[in-house]
Amino acid sequence: MEFNERLEALATKVRNQAEAIGTEEATKSAFVMPFIATILGYDVFDPMEVVPEFTADVGTKRGEKVDYAIVRGGEVQILIECKASLGSLKIEHASQLFRYFGTTNARLAVLTNGVVWQFYTDLDAPNKMDSKPFLVLDLLDIDETLIPEIQKLSKESFDLDSIINAAEELKYVGALKREIATQFREPSDEWIRFFATRVYDGMFTAKVREQFSSLVHKASKQFLTEQVNDRLKTALGVGAAAPVDPSPTSDVSSEQVAEDDLDRNTEIETTLEELEGYQIVKAIACSEVKPQRIVHRDQKSYFAILIDDNNRKPVARLHFNTKQKYLGLLDEAKAETRHPLESLDEIYQHADEIREAVQRYL
């Protein structure tokens, strides 16, 4: 597999197993060792490449260990410290990394819980590990712009100079992106004031702040959704969404779940139109949930779009096997309403219902 395919395969494993991994040792076995082996390409069973429980006594500190040291040319190049996958990562967890960083030749240190990988170097002071990572990889929400930088850490493509040279820009760009994402999710008072004072001419009182708190949050979500939808429509070569047709939709009630088609040995051909419809639904739904959680299963009678690849969490169904195409949306009782489609872009007219379906599973 290509590098990005291996990364996505591990991400799928993490997504499916993270909640079941409760200890640090389980995290190492399930996530960390596979990352070292399949993503970075080092032999975890060769002590000339990967040293578990690496010890390098520092001053009065004796017997402390770093979970893994990656060795190249007989020199330690990368130190890795692990925590349990269910726990959050804090800089306090990196105490061994700080101490060991200056006593080895390592220029790179990694703090991970198997899900989130924080990469550190010594940008602020030589031979002293920075307090902030220059790169953060979240396997549940992979930033594709970081994949080439992660690949530089692999055995096959290891390029320390290139990594260090890019580290400062990665550090600040990454930090800015995370801060922007935080503000979009939970706008701070400064963020609310920044936008409110540009569109509201009155005094910025407590009442105005309360009003604009929800407005800024709502506008931010709508802006992101519209940007995603615009890019998707451009990629698919479709025009602007058609006007809403006021005519009533046809209602079809169904209690049938997706298992009905799973065990049938029939030839199922997934069409380009079904994939395009799936991408539109995914673009709408990703305002509520990470896009990696939205998957599809093509059945004999319909094309299912699900959360977490779970047939009990349907978002929508595409009925594209007949001349008249339908978008199927299910309510809380799994009763399905089929909406006739003249073109794929009419799916956008049902964006609110799609988001409501996603919210039911969160």
Image (cartoon, grey):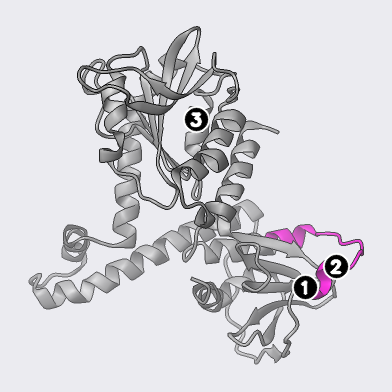
Within 10 Å of the Cα at label 3, are there few (<14), some (14-19), or many (20+) other Cα atoms?
many
The location of residue 145, given as percent across then percent down, is: 48, 37
Within 10 Å of the Cα at label 1, are there few (<14), some (14-19), or many (20+) other Cα atoms?
few
Residue 168, located in which quarter of the rendered image? top left
User: Hey, what amino acid is under mark 3?
Assistant: Ile
Question: Can you tell which of label 2 and label 3 is closer to the viewer?
Answer: 2
The location of residue 60, given as percent across then percent down, is: 20, 20
Residue marked by disc 2: 263
Nearer to us in this view, 86 or 240: 86
The location of residue 341, given as percent across then percent down, is: 71, 77
Residue 42 shown left or right of residue 273 in the figure: left
Residue 168's place in the image compared with 24, above or below, is: above
User: Hey, what amino acid is under mark 1?
Assistant: Glu
User: Hey, what amino acid is under mark 2?
Assistant: Asp
Name the disc covering residue 259, or none. 1
Which residue is depicted at the point 51% across and 61% down? 286
Residue 234, located in which quarter of the rendered image? bottom right
Q: Give the mark nearest the N terminus, 3 or 1.
A: 3
The location of residue 153, given as percent across then percent down, is: 50, 23
Which residue is depicted at the point 47% across and 57% down? 227
Residue 160's place in the image compared with 139, above or below, is: above
Which residue is depicted at the point 25% across and 18% down? 58
Name the disc covering residue 150, or none. 3
Quadrant where the N terminus lies?
A: top right
**Residues at marks 2 and 1, CA–CA distance in whole angstroms:** 7 Å
Which residue is depicted at the point 52% across and 34% down? 147
Dots 2 and 1: beta carbons under 8 Å? yes
Q: Does the segment drawn in magenta span residue 265? A: yes
- Classify mark 3: helix, strand or loop: helix
Magenta region: 259-276
**Residues at marks 3 and 1, CA–CA distance in whole angstroms:** 39 Å
